[in-house]
């Protein structure tokens, strides 16, 4: 065949896909989808005019939840659907997830790595450093990855892909029911996607990166290509329980039973309260010693009907010739436990979080701080997985091979403690100014730009001169020491000391 190239099925599909892209997505004739933008600023999640699909939720009873938990690998989808529903239906569960998601500020520092400082060129390092900062800033990490944290804590795994342009990087979540983890690359799980998803959701195909259209055509030509691994580093998976990669199990799936217990106890308490609001009035029709009615039965019935007509629905009446004794099912123990409060406390105890964080009745500050530190360790494990995803993305860029990003173990609850530690290190000459600023919510790019704005542009430090006082002036021989006390404030010994100068 000489030098003649053989065109494979895959090459033909890619070529046809490119031709299709050139003809089918004319700006003048079709809606402007994200991949066709010169500058990516948004992604289209769904076309409301073309699709009538809406999210569906599944409500399971406690017995089915117990069945799912007996074999979580086989019931991965059912457990995920259950926690998604409970997240919206239960304020306790949602607040617990949001609490764990808030245990990280997602503060990060970009630092050089694998650099020979004796031969490195500062200008080149500075130029590449700026490019890495621009990449991370365009991702809006604190906003986008906060959502990733919530999904991981709720469902265990976040499957995502990236839309990357010169000015923005947008994370698009993939449908979890059609994603699996089969490969780990550079310590980051890759996503294997089930392209049969587009058989029933073809209207969404153009709302995914071009890679999906190409690989979907491969699947259409060969059903053996149903599961395909997505390209890295633009696609990734972040897992909460990263010690079990073969299937997803929501971290708080075991709490579903406790949540059902709370609802059961609430219903019982409501029923009990309703019953306690009822009353019965008994009209006793006496009988004399001869066994005759003390009042004419018809007349007594007339009085009974008159009473019945004026009473509210919560009060019943009885006309009886016999004595009636009260039978109560209430507990005589005055210290009866509030079962709802007990069930709520059991929920948080089962989650490993202190119930005092959510219902501060008798909180001890030291115990709460220790409990928060333990909880923060769980969230920080997910944050370190996010760190691996970003470092893989940075290394894939031509300018990022000598840089890495490091997330700080910092949250709103320990910001002062972490900041004081970094500040002390800076005072000892350790190069951690960037770490201190990041712990206080000021990223490296903002730190540099604000310093330039205040010093070079506005000259704030030169213009904002403190008012003169003893704390801003040097001491002289006449003004040294603290101000003299009034004569009325002096003791007898003080007066003697002043007199002797």
Image: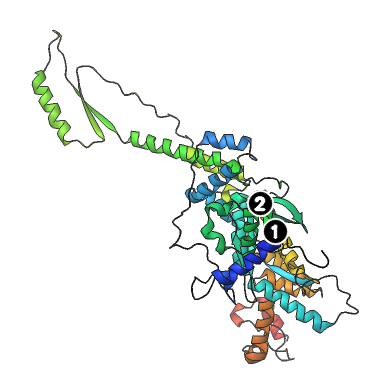
Q: Position of residue 489 (x, y in %)?
A: 61, 78
Does dot 2 land on a helix, a strand or a loop?
Answer: loop
Residue at 71% from the left image edge and 56% from the top image edge: 190
Cα separation, mark 2 vs mark 1, equals 10 Å
For residue 350, side relative to residue 315 (left or right): right
Nearer-the-camera pick, 368 or 214: 214
Q: Answer with left or right where residue 285 lies relative to residue 177.
A: left
**Which circle marks residue 487 in the picture?**
none
Asked if disc 2 and disc 1 are in contact, CB closer than 8 Å, the reply is yes
Helix, strand or loop at mark 1: helix
Disc 1 packing (10 Å; few <14; some 14–19; many ≥20): few
Residue linked to disc 1:
9
Residue 501 vertical position relative to residue 216 in the rendered view, above or below: below
Quick one: label 2 or label 1, which is nearer the N terminus? 1
Relative to 228, does residue 14 appear above or below in the rendering?
below
Dot 2 alpha-carbon crowd within 10 angstroms: few under 14, some 14 to 19, many 20 or more: few
């Amino acid at each position: 065949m000489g030098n003649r190239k053989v065109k494979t099925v895959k090459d033909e599909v890619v070529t046809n896909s490119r031709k299709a892209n050139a003809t089918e997505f004319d700006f003048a004739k079709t809606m402007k989808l994200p991949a066709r933008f010169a500058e990516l600023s948004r992604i289209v999640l769904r076309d409301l005019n073309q699709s009538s699909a809406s999210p569906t939720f599944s409500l399971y009873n406690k017995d089915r939840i117990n069945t799912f938990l007996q074999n979580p690998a086989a019931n991965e989808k059912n457990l995920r659907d259950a926690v998604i529903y409970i997240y919206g239906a239960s304020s306790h569960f949602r607040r617990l997830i949001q609490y764990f998601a808030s245990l990280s500020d997602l503060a990060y520092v970009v630092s050089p790595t694998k650099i020979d400082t004796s031969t490195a060129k500062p200008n080149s390092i500075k130029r590449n450093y700026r490019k890495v900062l621009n990449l991370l800033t365009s991702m809006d990490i604190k906003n986008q990855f906060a959502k990733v944290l919530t999904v991981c804590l709720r469902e265990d795994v976040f499957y995502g892909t990236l839309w990357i342009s010169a000015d923005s990087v947008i994370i698009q979540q993939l449908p979890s029911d059609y994603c699996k983890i089969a490969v780990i690359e550079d310590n980051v799980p890759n996503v294997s996607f089930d392209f049969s998803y587009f058989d029933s959701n073809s209207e969404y195909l153009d709302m995914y990166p071009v890679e999906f259209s190409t690989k979907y055509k491969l699947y259409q030509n060969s059903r053996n290509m149903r599961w395909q691994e997505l390209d890295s580093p633009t696609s990734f998976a972040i897992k909460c329980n990263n010690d079990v990669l073969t299937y997803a199990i929501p971290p708080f799936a075991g709490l579903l039973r406790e949540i059902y217990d709370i609802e059961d106890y609430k219903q019982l308490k409501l029923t009990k309260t309703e019953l306690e609001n009822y009353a019965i009035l008994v009209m006793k029709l006496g009988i004399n010693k001869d066994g005759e009615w003390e009042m004419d039965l018809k007349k007594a019935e007339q009085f009974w009907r008159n009473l019945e007509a004026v009473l509210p629905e919560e009060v019943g009446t009885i006309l009886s010739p016999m004595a009636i004794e009260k039978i109560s099912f209430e507990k005589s123990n005055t210290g009866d436990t509030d079962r709802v409060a007990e069930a709520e406390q059991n929920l948080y105890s089962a989650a490993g979080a202190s119930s005092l964080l959510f219902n501060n009745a008798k909180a001890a500050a030291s115990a709460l701080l220790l409990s928060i530190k333990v909880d923060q360790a769980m969230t920080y494990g997910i944050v370190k997985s996010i760190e691996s995803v970003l470092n893989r993305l940075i290394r894939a860029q031509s300018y990022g091979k000598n840089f890495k990003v490091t997330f700080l173990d910092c949250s709103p609850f320990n910001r002062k403690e972490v900041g004081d530690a970094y500040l002390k290190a800076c005072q000892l000459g350790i190069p951690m100014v960037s770490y201190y600023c990041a712990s206080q919510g000021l990223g490296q790019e903002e730190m540099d730009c604000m310093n330039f704005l205040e010093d070079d542009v506005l000259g704030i430090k030169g213009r904002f001169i403190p008012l003169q006082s003893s704390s801003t002036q040097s001491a002289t021989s006449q003004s040294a020491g603290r101000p003299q006390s009034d004569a009325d404030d002096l003791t007898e010994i003080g007066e003697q000391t002043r007199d002797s100068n």
